[in-house]
Image: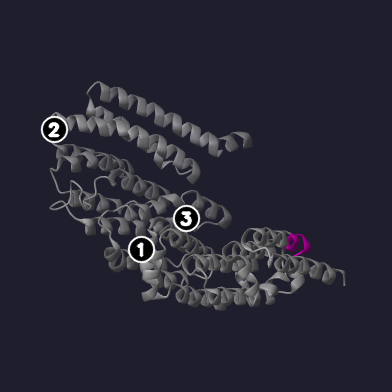
Amino acid sequence: MDVVQNEEFDPEILLERAQENAAGAANRMKRALESGNLREGIQYADTMLVELKNPYITPKNYYVLFMDIFNDLSYLEEACVERKKAGRKMVELYETVQQAEGLLQRLYLMATVACVYIDSKEALAKDIIKDIAEMTKGLQHPIRGLFFRYYLLKKLKDKFPDKESAFEGEGGNVNDCIDFVLENLAEMNRLWIRMQYSKNTDKAKADRNDVNMLIGENVTRLSNLRGIDLEVYKSIVQPRLFDIVHKCKDGISQQYLMDSVIQVFTDEFHLHTLENLLEACTSLHSSVDTKSILTSLMNRLSNFAATQPEEVRRVDKQLNVFGLFKKYIDRVLEKQGLSIGLKKLVEMEAAFLRLSLKAYPGNVDYVNQILEVCIKILQLQPAKSITEDCIQSVVKLLTSLLESLSIEIFNLSYFNSLVQYLTPPMLKTLAKRVIMLSLIHISEPTRPLYISYAVFCLKKKKKKNKT
């Protein structure tokens, strides 16, 4: 008996059965559509969609089943296109699919037909989208709601009345697009957070992680809207996005959404709205890994500064990019301190250093300020408890300095202090790097001085370890 029960609730067996049922209904739907029987095709599509109501399929497997059905529904959409070409009114078909008994099936069928309905221009794009959005509010099951809203985003991405689209004008404008996507994001985020309300917290977190890309699709759609320029982003999109992030008060959600914002929107947008972005990053739930978010942002802007130095300098005259990052990084250190983890703190400072070197080449004062903070961070922890991983991060930081400043590193106030934290093998590696750079960058008469310095550092470290 136990074996039978285990088989019945085995995730892979449940998925296989659902796929078989959905595939059978899909094949019957295709045969009906090929024979020109659209009404029967819709009925079989309804039967296929019932499989998405299975309450025992895991979120990860639900995605597999969803993609099978997503692809099969394209045959129904093609049949609707042919009917439109034949002169049938799409409003009639749109009303027909609303007779489906189950809400979930009804919504999928409406969304599929709506794509062709919008193309027909029998009704305004913004009105059709609003109609489906209103109907969708009734779908409150977390998994089913998340996946349907994701389907809606995917199907409507080319139907938005965006700037320069075929539906702009009377059919709507970019503000209608922004309203829909942000409202969809807010609702999807609420459904996603509700997945956490489970007795098995670890499993709930894993399940949420399996479907986080559904939430991110909203941010991607926003970033792809042609009507969103810097002014629109700064005055409308970013404030509303951050309002959604802060109101949810959920660490997992805030972490993912802020990471998504940083990854999908342009570097120019981030640079011109830097203070608002940093304020949002440092005002998140205490469980959020703020360091990784800031590090990701600084790495992006470092690459941007390397390719667009003039733009960075122009913006810096108004904002003081270094000063803003220094202010908010110091706030993170003050609020969270070593609770972040020593290695992560050093990595954050290393990212800040890289940004400084790219945006302000040759500014030794900024470098010294960052190195001073690194020393203070390391001094907070007993020397014996500093891990190998942390020291590796220090090595990467020093190596980036060598590659950018070459022999000028010897003029830095805190360089020698950081070197003291290196183990003999790491110091040996660093010394070799100094010697190589001296052979490349330093003239013949002064070269021995710097090579001797590198050897001296190595001998000094070995002698200290013996004592």
Residue annotated with mark 1? 269
Question: Mark 2 or mark 1, which is nearer to you?
Answer: 1
Marks 3 and 2, the one that precedes in the sequence: 2
- Does residue 284 appear to the left or right of 154 in the view shown? right
- Residue 352 position in % (x across, y down): 53, 68
Q: Is residue 425 magenta?
A: yes
Q: Nearer the viewer, residue 396 or 453?
A: 453
Residue annotated with mark 3? 195
Residue at the top extreme of this rendering: 35
Could you tell me which secondary element the residue under label 1 belongs to? Answer: helix
Question: Mark 3 or mark 2, which is nearer to you?
Answer: 2
For the residues labelled 3 and 2, the Cα–Cα distance comes to 42 Å
The stretch of residues the image draws in magenta is 423-428
For the residues labelled 3 and 1, the Cα–Cα distance comes to 32 Å
Residue annotated with mark 2? 88
- Residue 137 position in % (x across, y down): 30, 54
Marks 3 and 1, the one that precedes in the sequence: 3
The residue located at (46%, 49%) in the rendering is: 211
Residue at the front extreme of this rendering: 445
- Residue 76 position in % (x across, y down): 28, 32
